């Protein structure tokens, strides 16, 4: 950020937060992929009214992976 806008925001009392680490972009991409996979499993389960134990385990594993990535990023 350039100095002038920074000073202006500080004078106006705007809370400035540091730029998120670069890992956040990778985390968001990974969460998007995981979310899409879980949505596909849910769509498939709703359309054919059945879901296998393996599909459920895959969805649970994806959600656990998402939480692990979030914890690592924080």
Image: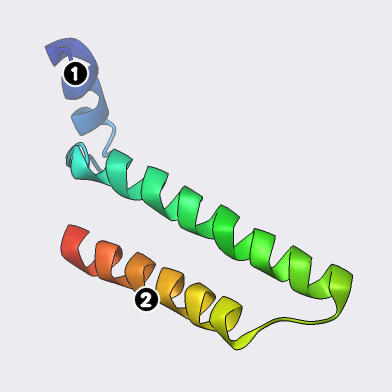
Q: Are marks 2 and 1 in contact (CB under 8 Å)?
A: no
Q: In the drawing, what numbered circle is on residue 42?
A: none
- Between residue 36 and residue 19, name the one nearer to us: 36
Using the rendered image of the protein, determine whether residue 74 is visible from the camera's viewpoint. no
Q: Mark 2 falls on what kind of element?
A: helix
Question: Which colour assignment does the render follow?
Answer: rainbow
| Residue that numbered label 2 is attached to | 64
| Rendering coords of residue 19 (x, y %) | 20, 36
Rate crowding at label 2 as few (under 14), some (14 to 19) or many (20 or more) other CA atoms within 10 Å. few
Image quadrant assignment for residue 18: top left
**Relative to 12, residue 49 above or below:** below
Image point 29% across, 42% down: which residue? 26
- Farthest left residue in view: 3
Using the rendered image of the protein, determine whether residue 50 is visible from the camera's viewpoint. yes
Task: Say whether residue 12 is left or right of residue 37.
Answer: left
Q: Give the mark nearest the N terminus, 2 or 1.
A: 1
Of badges 2 and 1, the one in the foreground is 2
| Rendering coords of residue 68 (x, y %) | 26, 70
- Between residue 17 and residue 31, name the one nearer to us: 31
Quarter of the picture containing the C terminus is bottom left
Quarter of the picture containing the N terminus is top left
| Rendering coords of residue 37 (x, y %) | 56, 58
| Rendering coords of residue 47 (x, y %) | 87, 68
Task: Say whether residue 50 is left or right of residue 4.
Answer: right
Image quadrant assignment for residue 49: bottom right
**Relative to 25, residue 38 above or below:** below
- Between residue 38 and residue 3, name the one nearer to us: 38
Q: State the separation of the CA atoms marked 2 and 1.
A: 36 Å
Q: In the drawing, what numbered circle is on residue 1?
A: 1
Task: Say whether residue 37 is left or right of residue 20.
Answer: right
């Amino acid at each position: 950020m350039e100095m002038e806008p920074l000073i202006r925001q500080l004078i106006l009392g705007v809370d400035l937060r540091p730029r998120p680490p670069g890992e956040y972009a990778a985390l968001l991409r990974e969460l998007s992929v995981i979310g899409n996979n879980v949505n596909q499993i849910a769509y498939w389960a709703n359309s054919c009214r059945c879901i296998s134990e393996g599909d459920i385990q895959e969805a649970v594993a994806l959600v656990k992976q998402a939480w692990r990535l979030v914890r690592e990023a924080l």
